[in-house]
């Protein structure tokens, strides 16, 4: 990664008025390239300061020879060298950010606990209260379940249920009039009734599920093309700059694999056959081996 660093060290010149102060200012600006987790030490702000002051008794301090007995001279020599230690770290996911935040919070709790002082009888206790412990990390939220189809309870399976056999029940059967009983009134045909197996067969029909009711998925308007994969972030930035100079919309991303951290350089083009073909041919002419992402 590339860091743009600006450091300033300023102080007020002794003896100046508060309305119009005079400042001693020291600063420097630099750019450094460092890998993830490495240390950077910056130095160069060196100050060598000598101060002289005199305190004396009026009149008596100005007398020759014996005036030294009535005045006091002070000489201070201060040499300062400013050094800055930096360790940049790339936070790739939420768990790494939570771990760093908890470690910093535990450090602050320890410093507050060490700053406690014993209380004196005439004075109240001026110590700061201890910070509460850090809450435990939250559990990952479960993925929301797809909405159920209309007319079906939530959590019901879309697969058809096998029909269950219904208990046999005796039903009175009407005897049709025969030739032996000509006076009998004609019996109306009974309406067909649905038994439990018939009801189960009706409900066994496949119902419309949520994916069938959902709107069709829209395809992305851009196509990603992976140009290269390198183990160094600095190398990845250089490839990104070259591709941008060639007219591509390029970017890089760092991913963690079983072999270690890998930096992938990709470009995005409009999802049209002519655009994709032109981009692939141009990347091959530049010496790369492009691969379509998602194919």
Image (spheres, rainbow, N blue to C red):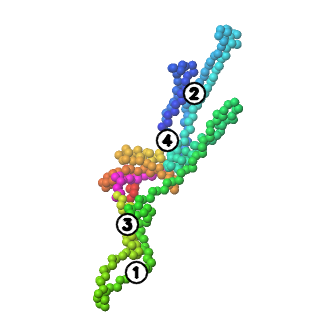
Work out how far the residue at label 2 is from the one at label 4, CA to CA, in angstroms. Answer: 27 Å
Q: Residue 240's x, y, as percent?
A: 41, 46
Q: Name the residue under label 3.
A: 207
Considering the numbered disc 1 on the image, is that residue within a helix, a strand or a loop? Answer: loop
Q: Nearer the viewer, mark 1 or mark 3?
A: 1
Considering the numbered disc 4 on the image, is that residue within a helix, a strand or a loop? Answer: strand
In terms of depth relative to the viewer, which is nearer, 263 or 71? 71
Cβ–Cβ under 8 Å for marks 3 and 2: no
Residue 54 lies in quadrant: top right
Answer whether residue 196 is magenta in the image: no
Q: Which residue is drawn at 42% across and 71% down?
A: 161
In terms of depth relative to the viewer, which is nearer, 130 or 100? 130
The answer to whether 142 is drawn above or below residue 134 in the figure is below
User: Is 278 left or right of 136, judged from the image as shown?
Assistant: left
Work out how far the residue at label 1 is from the one at label 4, CA to CA, in angstroms. Answer: 91 Å
The answer to whether 238 is drawn above or below residue 43 in the figure is below
Considering the numbered disc 2 on the image, is that residue within a helix, a strand or a loop? Answer: strand
Residue 82 lies in quadrant: top right
Q: Name the residue under label 2.
A: 47
Dot label at residue 171: 1
First in sequence: mark 1 or mark 3?
1
Looking at the image, can residue 279 be seen? no
* Residues shaded magenta: 216-231
Q: Residue at x 48, y 41 (%)?
A: 2
Q: Looking at this rendering, what residue extends furthest in the bottom direction?
A: 180
First in sequence: mark 4 or mark 3?
4
Count residues near mark 4 (Cα–Cα under 10 Å), then give few for <14, some for 14-19, many for 20+: few
Q: Residue 68's x, y, as percent?
A: 69, 13
């Amino acid at each position: 990664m590339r860091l743009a660093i600006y450091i300033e060290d300023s102080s007020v010149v002794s003896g100046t008025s508060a309305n119009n102060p005079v400042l001693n200012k020291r600063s420097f600006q630099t750019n450094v390239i460092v890998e993830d987790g490495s240390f950077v030490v910056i130095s160069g702000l060196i100050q060598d300061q000598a101060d002289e002051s005199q305190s004396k008794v009026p009149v008596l301090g100005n007398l020759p020879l014996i005036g030294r007995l009535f005045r006091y001279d002070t000489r201070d020599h201060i040499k300062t060298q400013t050094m800055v230690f930096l360790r940049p770290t790339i936070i790739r996911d939420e768990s790494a950010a939570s771990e760093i935040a908890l470690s910093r919070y535990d450090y602050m709790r320890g410093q507050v606990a060490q700053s406690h002082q014993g209380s004196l009888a005439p004075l109240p206790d001026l110590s700061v209260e201890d910070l509460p412990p850090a809450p435990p990390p939250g559990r990952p939220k479960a993925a929301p379940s797809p909405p159920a189809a209309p007319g079906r309870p939530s959590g019901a399976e879309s697969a058809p249920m096998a029909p269950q056999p219904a208990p046999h029940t005796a039903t009175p059967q009407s005897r049709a009039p025969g030739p032996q009983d000509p006076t009998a009134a004609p019996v109306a045909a009974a309406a067909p009734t649905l038994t439990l197996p018939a009801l189960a067969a009706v409900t066994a029909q496949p119902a419309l599920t949520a994916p069938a009711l959902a709107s069709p998925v829209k395809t992305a308007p851009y196509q990603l093309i992976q140009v290269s994969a390198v183990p160094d972030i600095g190398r990845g930035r250089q490839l990104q700059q070259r591709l941008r100079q060639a007219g591509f919309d390029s970017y890089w991303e760092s991913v963690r694999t079983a072999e270690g951290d890998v930096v992938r350089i990709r470009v995005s083009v409009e999802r049209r056959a002519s655009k994709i073909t032109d981009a692939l041919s141009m990347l091959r002419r530049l010496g790369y081996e492009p691969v379509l992402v998602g194919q």
